[in-house]
Image (cartoon, rainbow, N blue to C red):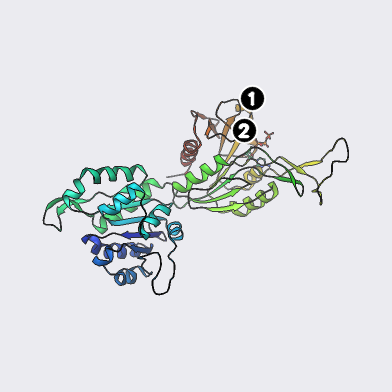
Amino acid sequence: MLKDKNIILGVCGSIAAYKSAILVRLLIKAGANVKVILTADAANFITPLTLATLSKNPVYTQYFEEETGVWSNHVELGLWADYMVIAPLSANTLAKMAGGLCDNLLSAVYLSAKCPVFVAPAMDLDMWRHESTQQNTDKIKSYGNVVIAPNNGELASGLYGAGRMAEPEEIVDFLNTAIQKDLPFLGKKVLVTAGPTYEAIDPVRFIGNHSSGKMGFAIADQFAKLGAEVTLITGPTEQKSQHKLKRIDVVSAAQMLEACEQEFGDADVMVMSAAVADYTPVTIAGQKIKKTDESLSIELTKTKDILAALGRSKTTAQILVGFALETEKEEDHAKEKLMKKNLDLIVLNSLNDKGAGFKTDTNKITIFNKAFEKTVFDIKSKTEVAKDICLEILKLIPA
Ligand code: CTP
């Protein structure tokens, strides 16, 4: 599970910091790439040299090296990580995470990271039981962080009770289980298209459509969240991805086709949610077209149907999902496209449904499978709709 995964291990000031050496060794043994960030206090408990030697990477303690001025870019570190683990997590860093404070490299990387974050608190019994600590723990859980609960046992203070950091072996087991459970698409390559395409008429004009790219980006993000290795091919859009993925920007239908054909070969799943232009001008004027005549005709030619082309080349192991945006006889048209384009699923949205379609933050979908069995979903946010789509696709993947 952890093989080849990039893990940032944050270590806070706590006597349990000595266990981070064992944790690093176990992560490295499991095949992970580990980079360690120490807070200033943590460096009093365990030396950077120990952790650098075990992790085979430099240890980060501050934003820049005082002697060389070399800058430790927190955003880059955050983006490098597939997982962030903070063990031990002190009450102080926990409070900072809950409040969004950012006064050292560890908290800056935490705020920049887009990956799942696991924390293993370690503190004295009364500190752990304190109402503020419990509230902070609930708060960081509500942000999506995963808390690996401390154990009961003898504490550094001599007291006995909850507050002992989970053992390194338990943390690694926890990570493996969580990754398996929460990341059902781990190891799967998923290709998603999003947005409109622009078909140039002349150097300043194009034929486009109202697609905002919101639905496709939400699907790509959801797949990434569920552990897939995602490639997102997108037409012109303002959207930004929230997760780590490979993004390929294209403009025209022809460019989208080329990118899709290049990436489809080793994809396990492909979701074609882009609103690809069906027609494109036969020629693109070299100069801006002047308004000389009363009327103007632009000859258009059909673009190649990307989805249909992929449907012809797909293997039985590949899952191909298309979209149908319809205004009439919605279900009939959707089922026809499902068959004609050799799809495994088709996601229908009707412009007759309020809150569905372009530019809205919501969508209402119906999904048909090959057997024409339909699943009707309520109107939901595009993020939730994306999750529904991913989970329907998951049903088609053998366990
Ligand atoms: N699509 C595609 N390539 C195109 C046109 C559409 O891959 N050149 C894909 C869309 O991304 C979508 C599906 O085909 O997943 C359905 O698109 P749609 O335009 O509704 O279907 P068409 O078959 O083009 O039919 P029509 O425009 O007549 O509704």
Q: Is residue 295 above or below residue 121?
A: above
Residue at 39% x, 50% y is: 116
Disc 1 under 8 Å from ligand 1? The reply is no
Disc 2 under 8 Å from ligand 1? The reply is yes
Is residue 345 or residue 144 the one in the foreground?
A: 144
Q: Provide residue 42's location: percent of width, then percent of height.
A: 27, 63
> How many numbered marks does the figure carry?
2
**Residue 11 is drawn in which quadrant?**
bottom left
In this figure, which residue is indicated by the disc labeled 2? 325
Is residue 79 or residue 96 the one in the foreground?
A: 96
Q: Provide residue 76's location: percent of width, then percent of height.
A: 46, 60
Which amino acid lies under the numbered mark 2 shown in the image of this protein? Leu
Badge 1: how crowded within 10 Å, few (<14), some, or many (20+)?
few
Q: Provide residue 368's location: percent of width, then percent of height.
A: 54, 32
Ligand 1 quadrant assignment: top right
Q: In this view, does 372 lie above or below 129?
A: above
